[in-house]
Image (spheres, rainbow, N blue to C red):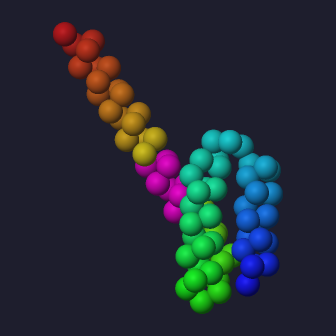
């Protein structure tokens, strides 16, 4: 059981080293949480880590888009005054 978590974490670390930093944003934290949740939900740590990585990236991209949109709207408000 512990070896599954170790393998999942090694896979995540290896994948993070291969990809760009922008692509890994949110993936590591999501993979760690998903791996732990998957482990306790029927010994599916690797599936949980992959799902957590995908979800973490989605949320990070969504947060970045919202931040960019609010910065753009704030910038247009300042320039219109």
What residue range appears in magenta? 54-62
Q: Seen in the image, is 73 located left or right of residue 5?
A: left
Query: Is 55 covered by the magenta stretch?
Result: yes
Q: Is residue 47 visible?
A: no
Residue at image point 64% right, 47% down? 23
Where does the N terminus fall, quadrant-wise? Answer: bottom right
> Which residue in the rendered view is the most extreme toward the bottom?
42
Q: Is residue 43 visible?
A: yes
- How many marks the image carries: the answer is 0
Quarter holding residue 63: top left
Residue drawn 37% across the image and 41% down it: 66
Residue at the far left in the pictured view: 81
Residue 52 position, x and y percent, is 57, 66
- What secondary structure prevails in the magenta region? helix
Answer left or right for 14 relative to 62: right
Vertical side of 30 occupied by 40: above or below: below
């Amino acid at each position: 059981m512990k070896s599954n978590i170790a393998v999942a974490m090694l896979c995540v670390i290896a994948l993070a080293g291969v990809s760009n930093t922008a692509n890994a944003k949110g993936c590591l934290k999501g993979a760690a949480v998903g791996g732990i949740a998957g482990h306790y939900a029927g010994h599916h740590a690797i599936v949980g880590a992959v799902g957590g990585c995908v979800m973490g990236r989605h949320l990070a991209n969504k947060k970045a888009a919202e931040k960019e949109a609010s910065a753009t709207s704030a910038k247009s408000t300042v320039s219109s005054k």
